[in-house]
Structures are given as C-alpha cells and as structure tokens.
Amino acid sequence: MINFLYTSLWLHVTCFPLVFCATSIEDAPVYRAKDRARGYACESAYDAIGLMKEGEVKKNYEEALCGEARCSDGVIEYFGCDITEVGPRCVVADKDFSKPYPDCCGQVTCF
C-alpha cells in the first residue's frame, strides 16, 4: 500500500485499430536503493505487477485478463483488449486467456 502513495495513475486512452488500446500509464519509479541496485526500474502499486526491470514486459499478469505491462524509464504502460464499439451485426468471439496478449483478445466477427 505504501507504494500507492508514491504512484500516480493517469487514464490515457490511445486506441489502435478497433481491438488493441493503451489503457493507462503508471508513474512507477523504484524508491528503494537495494531494488535499484538489483536492476529494477519500475515498481507498480499493483501486487500482480510488482517490480520490473527496464524493458521488461509482463503479459496476462492477472487471471482472466488479456493485456500486458511494459516498463520504461520508471513508467509502466498498460495495454489491453478494449473494444469500445462494434457494429449492430457484429460480435466479439474467441477470447482465450491461456494465450499471451494480444492473441488472447477476441476477434470481431460481423455477419
């Protein structure tokens, strides 16, 4: 919980073609010298993410979640499947959480 005091979370919605979106960015610098000495560059307020090294990518870091977290310069960028709108004759099918992101995202099928 103390990490949360040092962490800010901004909602940043930048969508890529229909299914893949960057959903948020977390300012997550590492404050403990011993963790920095071990090569960690990011420390998330979320227990499922925890400490990350520069350039590290964690995929599907929570159960029933299709997404990834990327560490770069003390910032964690989160990506996930987010279909904001599909046509009236379209559905999202074939989500498979056993596959890594973005393969776990469903496919938009229109009929």
Image: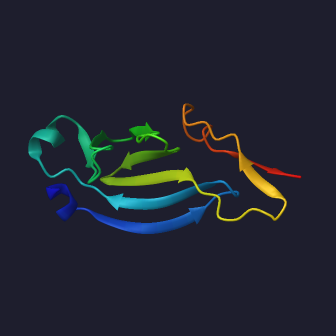
| In front of the other: 65 or 35 | 65
Specify the farthest residue to the right.
111
| In front of the other: 10 or 74 | 10
Classify residue 77 by image quadrant: bottom left
Here the colouring is rainbow
Left or right: where 12 falls relative to 104? left
**Picture layout, residue 99 above or below residue 11:** above
Which residue occupies 17% across, 42% down?
A: 36
**Picture layout, residue 26 above or below residue 98:** below
Where residue 13 sits: x, y (%)? 53, 66
Where residue 8 sits: x, y (%)? 29, 66
Which residue occupies 15% across, 52% down?
A: 31
Classify residue 49 by image quadrant: top left
Left or right: where 63 falls relative to 29? right
Where residue 35 sits: x, y (%)? 16, 40
Specify the farthest residue to the left.
33
Which residue occupies 57% across, 64% down?
A: 14
Where residue 28 sits: x, y (%)? 28, 55
**Picture layout, residue 29 above or below residue 34:** below
**Picture layout, residue 51 above or below residue 45:** above
Which residue occupies 70% across, 58% down?
A: 18
